[in-house]
Amino acid sequence: MKLSIVVSVYNEAQVLPQFVAELKAALAGLDCESEVLMVDDGSVDGSRELLDNIAAEWECMRVLHFTRNFGHEAAMIAGIDHATGDAIVCMDADCQNPPAMLGEMLKCHAEGNDIVTMVREERADGGWLNHITSRLFYRIINRLSDTHLQPNASDFFLVSQRVADVLRNDYRERTRFLRGLIQTVGFRSATLSYQAPRRAAGKSHYSLSSLTRLAFTSIAAFTKAPLKLGIYSGLLFGLLSVALIVYSIVMWIVDRPVGGYTTLIIFLSAFAAVVLLVVGITGYYVGIVLDEAKGRPLYLIDYTKEKNP
Ligand code: UDP
Ligand code: MG
């Protein structure tokens, strides 16, 4: 049994030494062969050199350096693509995904689970805004899409070789949300919960705006439901206009023409807003189709570094 650890690293020079120490300690306590794949997602803070130095001394570690920053998701995909283990664990480099949980995750895998989803208990570093928006996000996505996504699932998870093959061969879309995707492939899965400590140092790369973008991407990746807004609002405005037409004709017949300025303004502006919203949503999905049609690579590797190449 071989375990692959995939770690996405973007400007984590401050935390890497601590993380590597924690990971080494955890791996030493496991009774299996292991490989560590660090994916450097275009770091510019010295993480690059630091990783190469660590790899030069630690034989089970390999570093994949991206040509530029491709994002956390791409880093995890690249790691999964290059992993050779029977089980693959993705984790962050900031010590928020405790390596001490690896033993329990492997036990779960050994019991026959192809997927082990890690759910974090209350985030130590998340404020109330984070809490509310995260709950809102899962509520919306679960309402709109057919599959149920586990709230608070993290980018800390284990997949078996079989699931990794599915991800490598069949889920190559550019607009994706990996931790959601692995919950939709089926297979036997288990959930473990863990305490996410505070970030060891530095700060999160996800601002509120990038989280919002991720939320839109995820919704678009999982459901076409927003596209139906045009149909529903069309029906609603159709009914409203029938009522308005009937009302106006009746008033005209009884010779009491209505001063329709207010009605017109309300109707027109609401209608225009809905039409533009629908056009925007459609445009968003068209953009996704365009990205997929271009078929550009999910990531590009500059070079890899390992002790014994
Ligand atoms: N990360 C990455 N590419 C990016 C942004 C982040 O590989 O463009 C890595 C980062 O180094 C960390 C993990 O993804 O190991 C999670 O990022 P972060 O801790 O900033 O997110 P949070 O834990 O706050 O959700
Ligand atoms: Mg983090």
Image (cartoon, rainbow, N blue to C red):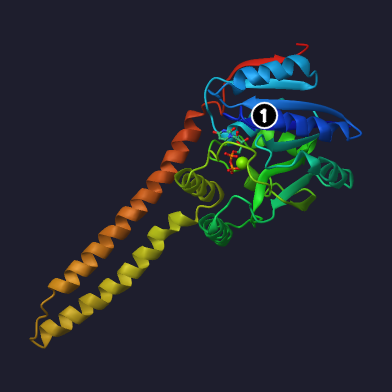
What residue does disc 1 label? 16
Q: Quadrant of the C terminus?
A: top right
Q: On screen, 254 above or below 70? A: below
Residue at mark 1: C-beta within 8 A of ligand 1: no
Looking at numbered disc 1 in the image, what kind of residue is underneath it?
Answer: Leu
Q: Is residue 174 above or below residue 191?
A: above
Left or right side of 309 for 16: left
Residue 123 placement (x, y as % from top left): 63, 52
Q: Nearer the viewer, residue 86 or 304?
A: 304
**Residue drawn at x 83%, y 28% as measured from the top left:** 34
Can residue 50 be seen here? The reply is: yes
Q: Residue 270 lies in what quarter of the image? A: bottom left
* Residue 197, position as x, y percentages in the image: 68, 47
Report the front residue among 211 and 196.
196
Residue at x 80% of width, y 30% of height:
24
At x 36%, y 64%, the residue is 233
Q: Quadrant of the N terminus?
A: top right
Residue at the image point whose x is 34% and y is 64% from the top: 234
Where's residue 243, x and y in %?
26, 78
- For residue 158, side relative to residue 136 (left or right): right
Q: Is residue 83 visible?
A: no
Which quarter of the frame holds ligand 1?
top right
How packed mark 1 is, by other alpha carbons closer than 10 Å (few <14, some 14-19, many 20 or more), is many
Which residue of the protein is positioned furthest toward the left in this rendering? 255
Residue 11 appears at what percent x and percent y?
57, 28
